[in-house]
Image (cartoon, rainbow, N blue to C red):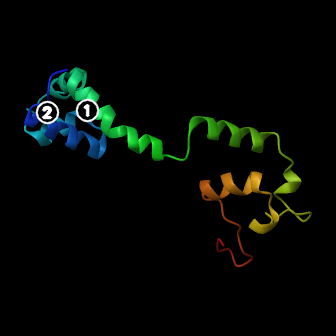
């Protein structure tokens, strides 16, 4: 595989900032009149390989995988609503909710409303 030119290395670094090939190409000094420069760089084998190499650690660090999402959705879809809401209707406290429901709800940003209307 061919080695990257300095400008191609700069393009890769810029692309990794926002994953936008056109903007990365413009910031690297290519013409901003079309998306062609970004697209051309993205199909270059050496550039693409370097981008994939650089993105690999980011992808590995992501805790939320497609499999985890499907499992969480299934847990919620087939769960018992009584595990989440108390007999009077309000959402149970986080300590009272089973871990099956607590983890997805917490990561999604759901919060229990306090009687004063503020999320807790």
Q: Left or right of 107: which side holds 10?
A: left
Q: In percent of the image, x 66 and y 64: which residue is there? A: 111
Q: Which of the two labelled residues, at mark 2 and mark 1, occupies the earlier sequence position?
A: 2
Residue 77, placed above or below residue 106: above
Q: Residue at x 63, y 40 (%)?
A: 69
Task: Identify the mark at residue 50; answer none if there is no mark.
Answer: 1
Q: Residues within 10 Å of mark 1 (few under 14, many from 20)?
A: some
Question: In front: mark 2 or mark 1?
Answer: 1
Residue beneath the point at 40% across and 44% down: 58
Residue extending farthest to the bottom is: 116
Specify the quadrant that holds the C terminus.
bottom right
In percent of width and height, residue 119 lies at 65, 71
Q: Residue 91: which numbered mark, if any? A: none
Measured Cα–Cα span from mark 2 to mark 1: 10 Å
Q: Quadrant of residue 8?
A: top left
x and y, in percent, of residue 96 in the image: 82, 66
Q: Secondary structure at mark 2?
A: helix
């Amino acid at each position: 595989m061919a080695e990257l030119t300095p400008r191609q290395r700069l393009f890769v670094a810029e692309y990794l900032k926002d994953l936008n090939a056109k903007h990365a190409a413009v910031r690297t000094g290519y013409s901003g009149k079309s998306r062609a420069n970004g697209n051309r760089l993205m199909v270059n084998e050496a550039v693409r390989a370097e981008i994939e190499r650089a993105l690999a650690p980011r992808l590995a660090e992501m805790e939320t995988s497609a499999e985890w999402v499907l499992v969480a959705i299934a847990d919620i879809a087939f769960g018992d609503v009584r595990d989440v809401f108390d007999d009077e209707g309000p959402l149970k406290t986080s300590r009272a909710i089973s871990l099956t429901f607590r983890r997805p709800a917490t990561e999604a940003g759901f919060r229990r409303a306090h009687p004063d209307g503020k999320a807790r």
